[in-house]
Amino acid sequence: MKKIYSLLVATILTVAFTGCMGDAKPAEFKADTPQSVQIFTSKNIDGKITPKTIGAAFEASGLKMGGNNNMNNPFKLRFNKTHYNTYHLAMFRDNELSVKLVKKYPRFGRLVPLTMSIWSEGDTMNVSTLTLEGLARTAKVPVTDPDLIAYAAKVKKALKAAMPNGEFKPLNHKVLEPTATYEINFTAEIDSDPEDWRDDFETEFEGEMEPIGFLFPNYTNMNEELFEEAGVEDFDFYITYSICKFDVIFPVSKETPEAGAYAPCSMYAYKKKGENTVHIGYLGVDNWIKTLDMTDKEAIAKLKEAEGMINKILTELTE
């Protein structure tokens, strides 16, 4: 696949690849560390609770659904088996709170949209989402931020509306600090037209990712879909991609179906007005591994392999 030659001609790129949030900390477990992921579960003997009714309840609660994808269909076709009777990956967001949080913390885009997995085991339906502490940890936002607290409360309200007789399942994952990084970051200094840069980047990024099995179940142009209506003019552009790969989520979901709280993972790219720096970032898989207490070697290997593929492509597109 050709590189962005037109971009390289029009743009002076200075590339910096950095691990997010400073030096990596050694893994350390504290017994009272809050869980990053929560599982809301309900008996569903009559089968009336479905991914569709859950999505409708989220919509009715003011959370815009960005997709609610049945993963069992591609799993059956690709792997000739499934792990659960039902397994969906869904995306959702609160427009107003997303705008407020991204305006204050631009890298909150790694959680626009939020995600959840929906799966059934026997007569039980389950939904996994991030907890307040998980949102704060993942986005590096203070856990005391009122907009973040409001977002977490809205998710809980939607879960209870979706499954009125449900309850949160006790979890005891050993939540560790990543040994690598929370987020993978790329930056580039540009002096070309921002929209031209974005157009070229999107074309090449999608063109490189799709042939090696990556899918984009959701794309958000935040300037057009969120910021314009809110009167926010801080960015020349701000986009997010939801990224998924069947070869990754299939083995991961076998032992940790709640991983859908992180998947499809979100990647952002933005440029602030008055600056020449483009910021690109997504959540490192080590955070998945360390908050979900993952031990399955195949699942971990697939996550790290996918991260390596994404890093290679982003390096090529910004060098």
Image (cartoon, rainbow, N blue to C red):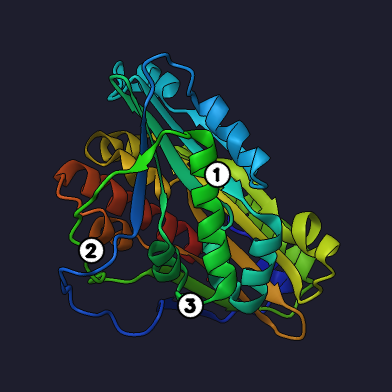
User: Of marks 3 and 1, which one's residue comes earlier in the chain?
Assistant: 3
Label 3 element class:
loop
User: Of marks 2 and 1, which one's residue comes earlier in the chain?
Assistant: 1
> Residue beneath label 3, please?
144
**Residue 220 spot, x, y in % from top left:** 67, 52
Which amino acid does the dot numbered 1 rest on?
Ala
The part of the image, by quadrant, that contains residue 42 is top left
The part of the image, by quadrant, that contains residue 103 is bottom right
Disc 2 from disc 1: Cα separation:
25 Å
**Residue 215 spot, x, y in % from top left:** 51, 39
Figure check: 218 above or below 71: below
Q: Is residue 6 visible?
A: no
> Residue beneath label 1, please?
158
| In the displayed structure image, the side of residue 280 where residue 226 appears, left or right | right
Residue at image point 43% right, 23% down: 74
Front residue of this view, candidates 303 and 264: 264
User: Of marks 2 and 3, which one's residue comes earlier in the chain?
Assistant: 3
Callout 2: 10 Å neighbours few (<14), some, many (20+)?
many
Q: Nearer the viewer, mark 2 or mark 3?
A: 3
Callout 1: 10 Å neighbours few (<14), some, many (20+)?
many
Label 1 element class:
helix
> Residue beneath label 2, please?
175
Label 2 element class:
loop
**Residue 172 spot, x, y in % from top left:** 19, 54
The part of the image, by quadrant, that contains residue 240 is bottom right
Front residue of this view, candidates 25 and 304: 25
Figure check: 250 above or below 298: above
Disc 2 from disc 3: Cα separation:
20 Å
